[in-house]
Image: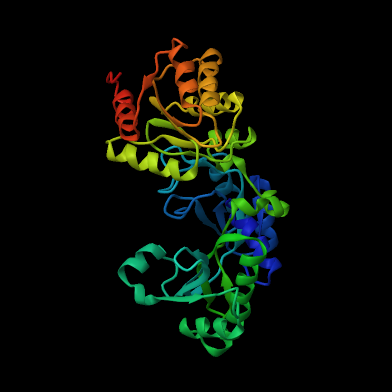
């Protein structure tokens, strides 16, 4: 789950990480009042779940409260399109108004889980304000990496000092950076973050070290014990079908950019289906992992979500029944056709528990389903069906 910048900065402040003065505004009048309270030049930052805001016109500078109100009116209620949003963009429902700072240096700081080691890793660089992926690709020597082993020593203050000195900070700036880095790690652990990023981390001309930007992502699997974090969710920034799926108890639906909908059971099978579709020349529109269920109504709900996607030109159902019974899945498919106005071809490949009964249910349904025996055959038929080619 993602948080807005103003929400992340509120958590930063809670953990002692210095941030610029500012507040969130939902109307131009609120932006004017905040700018008047700050006094002087302010920055207006669109609050959306996407990077690249500056290049897309989502960050503006105002020299007066009136100008802040005028600029806020050009942002609020509009959609921001960045390289991360796709052409549909995301709505700007609020803006962060904060003091404009004169910066001397822009640095980079983040904490993520290193999949290779399974440990948190703090990454820092003097090349802040840039795409860190580009820095890592072209000048990896500019990135400092410090792994933290929670099962051994855990985070130690000397690690923060090493990072601060590695950023070539002056002694008085090191004194500021050490508690900042420590606070960021405490926040990362305490709130079950999957990413905590400051880009840029700035040194101002008057010598302060603070977080000019803030990005926090949280582990969805930990939200059940982080109700305060779950309350930060802004569904206006998420795909409507993903939001609808979650509301109906389906956690594993992910929207993609292709035209073949996918109903599978199991995350591994889902990944294999996506790969196989790609190998067959197709492009997945989504995947929905229905998990281990034995309720036809859940199949109906899942197919309602998949077929509601206007990009879907064909649906591939690939079920390997273990604890999930194939005959229950087959019954759900048949019932779904009775209650959903389905206008796209369905490719169905079933295997596993109660396969014979499942095949019998589909055979006797009278539905015009495209059947497949093997994984590869199913993928190839789905690609052909999405292209409007008969493959039955």
Q: Position of residue 380 (x, y in %)?
A: 29, 30
Q: Position of residue 234 (x, y in %)?
A: 62, 44
Q: Which is more toward the observer, 21 or 190?
A: 190
Q: Which is more toward the observer, 319 or 273?
A: 319
Q: Is residue 211 visible?
A: yes
Left or right of 165 in this view: 228: right
Q: Residue at x 64, y 35 (%)?
A: 247
Q: Which is more toward the observer, 331 or 147?
A: 331
Q: Position of residue 94 (x, y in %)?
A: 61, 47
Which part of the image, by quadrant, shows the C terminus? top left
Q: Residue at x 46, y 55 (%)?
A: 54
Q: Position of residue 275 (x, y in %)?
A: 35, 43
Left or right of 306 in this view: 30: right
Q: Is residue 262 above or below residue 141?
A: above
Q: Is residue 205 above or below residue 34?
A: below
Q: Residue at x 55, y 22 (%)?
A: 332
């Amino acid at each position: 789950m993602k948080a807005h910048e103003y929400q992340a900065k509120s958590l930063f402040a809670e953990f002692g990480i210095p941030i610029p003065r500012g507040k969130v505004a939902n109307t131009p009048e609120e932006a004017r009042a905040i700018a008047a309270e700050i006094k002087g030049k302010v920055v207006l930052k669109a609050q959306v779940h996407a990077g690249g805001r500056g290049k897309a016109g989502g960050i503006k500078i105002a020299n007066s409260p009136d100008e802040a109100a005028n600029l806020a009116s050009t942002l609020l209620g509009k959609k921001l399109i960045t390289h991360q949003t796709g052409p549909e963009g995301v709505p700007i429902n609020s803006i962060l108004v904060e003091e404009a700072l004169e910066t001397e240096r822009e640095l980079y700081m983040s904490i993520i889980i290193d999949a290779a080691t399974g440990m948190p890793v703090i990454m820092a660089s003097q090349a802040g304000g840039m795409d860190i992926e580009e820095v890592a690709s072209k000048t990896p020597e500019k990135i400092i990496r410090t792994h933290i082993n929670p099962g051994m020593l855990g985070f130690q203050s000397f690690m923060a000092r090493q990072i601060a000195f590695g950023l070539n900070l002056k002694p008085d700036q090191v004194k500021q950076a050490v508690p900042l880095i420590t606070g960021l790690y405490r926040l990362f652990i305490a709130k079950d973050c999957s990413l905590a990023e400051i880009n840029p981390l700035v040194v101002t001309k008057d010598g302060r070290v603070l977080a000019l930007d803030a990005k926090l992502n949280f582990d969805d699997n930990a939200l059940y014990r982080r109700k305060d974090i779950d309350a930060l969710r802004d569904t206006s920034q998420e795909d409507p079908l993903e939001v609808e799926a979650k509301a109906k108890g389906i956690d594993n639906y992910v929207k993609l950019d292709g035209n073949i909908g996918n109903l599978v059971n199991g995350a591994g099978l889902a990944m294999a289906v996506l790969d196989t579709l790609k190998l067959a020349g197709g492009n997945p529109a989504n995947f929905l992992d229905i998990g281990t269920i034995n309720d036809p109504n859940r199949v109906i709900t899942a197919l309602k979500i998949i077929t509601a996607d206007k990009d879907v030109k064909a649906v591939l159902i690939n079920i390997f029944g273990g604890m999930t019974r194939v005959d229950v899945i087959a019954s759900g498919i048949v019932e779904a056709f009775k209650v959903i106005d389905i206008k796209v071809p369905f490719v169905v490949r079933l295997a596993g528990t109660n396969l014979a009964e499942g095949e019998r249910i589909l055979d006797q349904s009278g539905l015009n389903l495209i059947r497949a025996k093997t994984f590869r055959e199913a993928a190839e038929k789905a690609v052909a069906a999405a292209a409007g080619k008969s493959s039955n």
